[in-house]
Image (cartoon, helix red, strand yellow):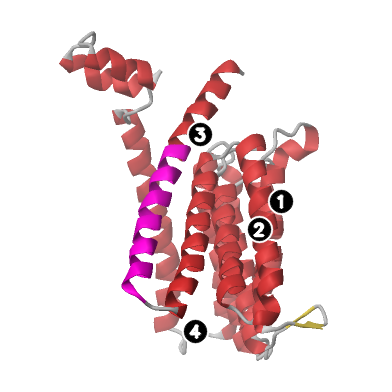
Amino acid sequence: MAKAVYSWIQKGLISSKDQYEALIQAGERASPAAWRVFIERVLVMLGLLSLACGVVFFFAYNWNEISRFYKFLTLQVLLVAVVSAYLKWAKNHWLQEAVIITAAAILDALLALFGQTYQTGADPWQLFATWALLITPWVWLSRAEAMWIFWAVLLNTALILKFEVDRSLLGWSLSQHQVSWAFLLLNGLLLCVTEWVSLDWRGFLKRVRLQDRWAALVMGLMVLFVLTTIGLLGIWGDQSVRAASLLTFLVVMAIWFYVYRFIKKDLLLLTAWAMAVIVFILSLLANSVFDSFDAGGLLLMAISLIAMTTFAVSWIKKTHGIFKQEASHE
């Protein structure tokens, strides 16, 4: 419809005073009502953020004057109040999403207070891992994309802090290069689970189904970042890990292209895939150039970058057109 509206505007079939309204109807411009909803949501988010910051600053300023009992009481009352607000606003999904994230932040403060008060001696990664574990039911039942992203960030943070303490996982001692594969496995599993709960489920599983694809998009970008790092290890890393890194990169990239080109048909993740391919090819060229540093090699890299970017943009536009045609025939 948007293409038709732009065509009518170019042909002069729509007057200048009606063009903006036509673009709104085509979904190319935001309506005043949509702007009001957006501003309202931003203000509520800022209000909840201010509330959370106020709680933190209150405890920071009055920490020594507050007894242990009132510290725990205040945080638990806040947590119960926020969860109650979540249950009350059951019909307002985006407001529920903001409230449940606030509840997760208060839960973290409660865990930190418990660890500091009773001197548990736990490592920082254990705090994040416990935090992620406790909010797992909220993540699944809230159907909130932001909570899924928040959960993924917590798990990745816990794994990063874990490897700073020691590079062992489930009894296996990992090398520096194998750490990247651990992150690939973690984020790959998170992406698969997110795609799974985004399917058009019926019955009980409909209660955990995500409405949008924002969580899958963010986790897909995280997977591509780790995968590109592994691909670069195949070029610049030690000789002992190059073959395994290159094989992992090529196999997962091939699977990625097939899934998001022919099954999920996600243009954004295909665009990110194309960028990862460009980075990988440029790294291959750079590896050759830096071995025999000369101006000709740098010129080759510049020309290759321009050519690959041009081809990628053309391919993405063509793929977008194919996706639109396929969607119109369904």
**Which of the two discs, 4 and 1, labels the residue nearer the N terminus?**
4
Q: Nearer the viewer, mark 1 or mark 3?
A: 3
- Give the label, 1 or 2, closer to the camera: 2
Say which residue label 2 marks: 250
Q: Which mark is residue 193?
A: 1
Spatial CA span between label 3 and label 4: 61 Å
Which residue type does callout 1 highlight? Val
| Residue at image point 52% right, 57% down | 276
- Confirm or deny contact between disc 1 and disc 2 (CB under 8 A): no
Q: Which of pointers 1 and 3 lies earlier in the amino acid sequence?
A: 1
Q: Three-letter amino acid code at disc 2?
A: Leu
Marks 1 and 3, Cα distance to the nearest angstrom?
A: 26 Å
Which of marks 2 and 3 precedes in the sequence?
2
Q: Residue 134, can we see it?
A: no
Residue drawn at the location 30% of the way across and 20% of the way down: 6
Tell me if 217 is positioned left or right of 171 in this view: left
What range is drawn magenta here? 294-315
Give the label, 4 or 1, closer to the camera: 1
Distance from disc 4 to disc 2, alpha carbons, whole Å, reads 57 Å
Mark 1–mark 2 distance (CA, rounded to whole Å)? 22 Å
- For the residues labelled 3 and 2, the Cα–Cα distance comes to 22 Å
Tell me the tag on residue 138: none
Question: Is label 3 or label 4 in front?
Answer: 3
Indicate yes or no whether the magenta region holds residue 225: no
Residue 186 horizontal/vertical position (percent): 69, 64
Residue at position x 63%, y 82% in the image = 238
Residue at which label 4 appears: 66
User: Label for residue 319?
Assistant: 3
